[in-house]
Image: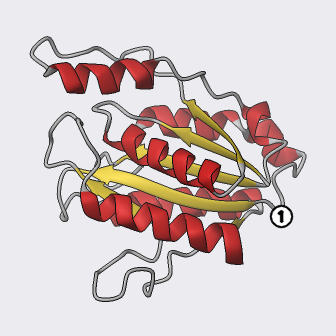
Amino acid sequence: MKIVIVIHSVCGNTYLTAKAFQEEFLKAGREVSLLRVADPSWTEKPDLSDKAREVLSAMRALPEAKPNDLLNADMILMGSPTYFGNVSAQMKAFMDSTGGVWFKGQLVGKKFAAFASAGNTEGGGDLCLAALHTYAKYMGMFSAPLPVTTLPGENVNSLGIIQYSNGKYAETLDAKTSRVVTAFVHFLATRF
């Protein structure tokens, strides 16, 4: 199974979640490409920790996603920071750039999953996930739910994973998100 992960990340939080997905899919024996959308206006804050600077450097080194990168995938994952309860403008621009792919029906039948980052639990991350799944539906893809039984005793969003950043630049992935990614990949790799 070939998997393509397309992200937009500014502070590195969405990137760290994507990297965890990539690592877990590789452990499951899947072929994975991790790509970022174009972000010509991105700038780095001058007062970052060395670890945050390392995360952002790795993120910026990812290849830039193009619509044709989606064509050979069996499963597509998309991740975006949450801006005003929606995907970022940069992710939306990438989604819009796939109009030709949509017109030809080239993503029909592919599998899809989503993840997001948000400043806090009231940041609209669930709406961002819904926007990503709406895109997938219009493209004719099958959306993978995140079963609420993925981690018994812990709350998870059925639309996907939300990494809460509290507005900070990323240095590491929080433990719960890491556990949910591992469980979600197991579900996707064995049942979806």
Say if 141 sits above or below 66 in the image.
below
- Going 52% across and 40% down the picture, which residue do you hit? 92
Residue 91 percent across, percent down from the top left: 50, 38
- 4 left or right of 1 in image: left
Say if 84 sits above or below 162 in the image.
above
The residue at the far left in this view is 47
Q: Quadrant of residue 127?
A: bottom left
Residue 134 percent across, percent down from the top left: 58, 63
- 132 left or right of 127 in image: right
Identify the image's colour scheme: rainbow, by chain, secondary structure or one colour: secondary structure
Residue 168 percent across, percent down from the top left: 15, 38
**Amino acid identity at mark 1:** Gly
- Going 54% across and 29% down the picture, which residue do you hit? 37
Residue 33 percent across, percent down from the top left: 66, 37
- 192 left or right of 80 in image: right
Say if 39 sits above or below 79 in the image.
above
Q: Quadrant of residue 97?
A: top right
Residue 144 visible to the viewer: no
Q: Label 1 belongs to which residue?
A: 109
Residue 71 visible to the viewer: yes
- Quarter that holds the C terminus: bottom right
